[in-house]
Structure formats: C-alpha cells, structure tokens
Amino acid sequence: IVPRTRGRERSTSIDEVVQEVLAREQEGVLEVVLTGTQLGNYGRDLHWDEPGPRRLLEALLERTSVPRIRLSSLQAQDISPDLLRLWRDPRLCPHFHLPLQSGSDTVLRLMRRRYTAERFRRAVALIRELVPDVAITTDLIAGFPDETDADFEATHSLCEEIGFAAIHAFPYSRRPGTAANLMRNHLPVAVRRRRLERLLTLADASAQAFRRRHLGRLMPVLWEERKRGLWQGLTPNYLRVYTRADDDLTNKLLPTRLLALQDEGVSGEPEPAAIPLT
C-alpha cells in the first residue's frame, strides 16, 4: 500500500545527503540514521551502474566526519560482500535491521517478498562473517492469510536458529487497498494472537541472550537523554544502556562498562577517567 499512496521512489542526491549530514555535524550531532521506504533501492531511479547504498556510504565516509552512521533497514537481497566491506570503517554502526516477516517460502511468496528463507539465512551468515560484533534485528508478521501451522513453525524455527538481537513481531491485520485484504483464508483472531505470543516469548529470550553476551565489556555509548532519573544511550550495535549520573551526559560518547541486564537493555557505568570519544 505504501507505493500506491506515496508514488514512485525518489532518491535524494548524494550531494544533498552529504550537505545535510555536514549541517548536522555543525550542530554537534554524533550519529545520523539513513532512512527510506526501501533503502536498498536507493539510486535505482538515478540509473547508476553500481548499488546506491554503497555509493552513498562511500561518499559519507569520505566527505563527512560524523562519528556514527547507522542504516535504518535493508532487505536480504540488498546484502553483498562489497557493501559489507565498508563496515571495516568503525564509523558504520554494526547493526542491520533485516525484515524477515516469515520463515516460510510459501508465505513469503504470498507477501510478494523478493527473497526466500534460505537467501535470508545466507545474508545473515555473510553479515556475521564480515561485520564483527553485529546486531541483527528483524520484523515478523504472525497469522498472515493462508499461514498454516507448518508455515508458522518454519518461522519460529528460523528465528531460533538465527538468534536475533531484537524481534519486532506484529499480528496480521486487514488493511483496505492491499492484496492481502482480498485473500480468502484470513485466520481467526485467536490463532493470530497465539502465534504472536509465541513469537514474543522467543523475542524476549533471544534479546536477553544477546544482551547477556555483552556484560562485562567496555563499549562506546552515545548518551541521549534522562528519563525518570536514568540516563539512556546506545552502543554502536544497538544495545540500550542505562545509568545514573549527576553530570549532564546529553550527546556525550563515552566508554562505558556494561554491568547487568536491566529493563529492555543493560545497566552501565561510564569509566571514571573516560575520555570522550569525539
């Protein structure tokens, strides 16, 4: 429905993106996030000979000095060795959001996705091979029309196998104007809810395991804001970190020791003699 309501994709020129990032740098911004409806399609409307995302990232790394660059989302078919080699530069955050939606090839075809479960699996393996300490997060839809028990179990099994750092799971809901809305076999709400609950349970266990692996480590944290007495910030690989401090940590990038699981992230302590990383 997004292409229908927004029209054809239009790529902002590289020069415009670079100038926008440079302007944010002058304001003291330490992290920029590149976003788009289909970020992997960037540059296709400009008829470039090489993939647009790689070309854009190369320009940003060469022409700006912002400490962190994060991508909002890519698709499995967008992942390639040439793209991933850019992550040798530590300014690129080791965080990839790859929407899976379903681990069943049958359901993926019904969704008109341009990848299979196996292609998704290979993309994840390639990312983990070439990008150290990476976080891979995803989106899932529970109870898509015609999703059988076997289809759902394929999704659940693939998610267990991959071990995502975070899973955003949603129940399917009908939306007028979509092809799925015209499909016949819409599952009962109770079935969709049961499947969603199982995915949410798996998501919690998977996220906890990812966070636990980082405890005890010293990692750079970009501190953002204080809420209810707790400062909150992010590591490059998308771990939410909390700490209590009297000092103003707003927009400070500090080495921080990760101590324990807390809420939807971990507690941390900026090193007493830490030197800002900017």
Image (spheres, rainbow, N blue to C red):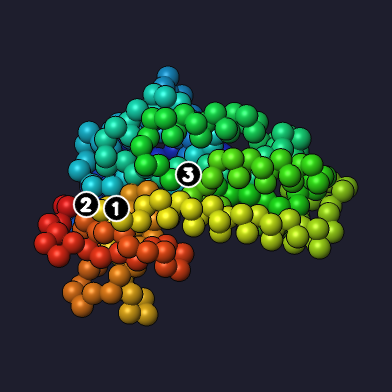
Judging by the rendered image, the residue that carries numbered circle 1 is 217
Q: CA distance from mark 3 to mark 2?
A: 27 Å
**Label 3 vs label 1, nearer the camera:** 1
Question: Please, what is the three-letter code of the amino acid marked with disc 1?
Answer: Arg
- Specify which label sits upstream in the sequence, 3 or 2: 2
Percent position (x, y) of residue 73? 48, 44
Q: Residue at x 26, y 59 (%)?
A: 257
The reply, left or right, for residue 74 in relation to residue 151 is left
Q: Could you say which is closer to the camera, residue 261 or residue 3?
A: 261
Element under disc 2: helix
Pointer 3 or 1: first along the chain: 3
* Mark-to-mark CA distance, 1 and 2: 29 Å
Q: Residue at x 42, y 30 (%)?
A: 129
Is disc 3 placed on a helix, strand or loop? Answer: strand
Give residue 15's quadrant in the image. top left
Q: Say which residue label 2 marks.
A: 25
The CA distance from mark 3 to mark 1 is: 19 Å
Residue sitting at the far right: 184
Residue 136 disc label? 3
* Kind of residue at badge 3: Ile
Residue in view at x 30 percent, y 70 percent: 243
- Image x and y of residue 216, in percent: 31, 56
Between 194 and 160, the one lying in front of the other is 160
Q: Which of the 4 image quarters holds residue 195? A: bottom right
